[in-house]
Amino acid sequence: MTDRVRASDRIRATERARATERVRVTSPRMSAVARPEIRPATREIDEETEVGEVYLKALLRSQLRPALVVLGVVLGGLGGLPLFFLALPEVADTRVGPVTVAWIVLGVAVFPLLFVAAWWHVRAVERAERDFTEILRRR
């Protein structure tokens, strides 16, 4: 029996030794190449990096175009009216009821032009912002 006791003691001793051994568990991807950090474009803008500045300048440029178009149309339309009335004074002096045509055009007819110009400008700028947001999402 002493041989059996000694054998079981040896087995227990080897089990204890195995239990106290350190085992290192590693991923099979430990040798894989690390991926570069993906920086979303919104982060570039928030941190005011050079790339973020390029994005913002592109957005501002795309919003400037419609603003200049509207400015040109409105200034051309409103600025052209006095020249039109100077060139054709008989039209400016024509009366519709107690009011001259010049006052009717300047006081009433101008506002639909301004409304349409503002509506178009808002639509164009919102479209530019939508496109900009879509570009940022794709990146």
Image (cartoon, helix red, strand yellow):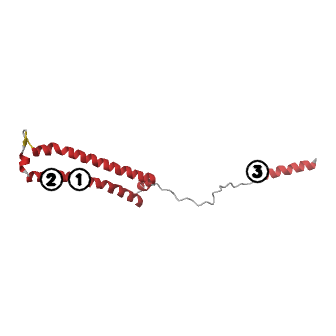
Residue 49 visible from this viewpoint: no
What secondary structure is marked by label 2? Answer: helix
Residue 6 visible from this viewpoint: yes
Residue depicted at x 23% and y 53%: 71
Amino acid beneath label 3: Ala
> How far apart are the two marked residues, 2 and 3, measured between alpha carbons?
95 Å
Residue depicted at x 93% and y 48%: 2
Q: Is residue 16 left or right of residue 125?
A: right
Q: Is residue 13 left or right of residue 139?
A: right
Q: Which residue is mark 1?
A: 71
What secondary structure is marked by label 1? Answer: helix
Amino acid beneath label 1: Leu
Among the two numbered marks 2 and 1 on one chain, the one whose residue lies closer to the N terminus: 1
What secondary structure is marked by label 3? Answer: helix
Q: Which residue is mark 3?
A: 19
Q: Is residue 132 left or right of residue 34?
A: left
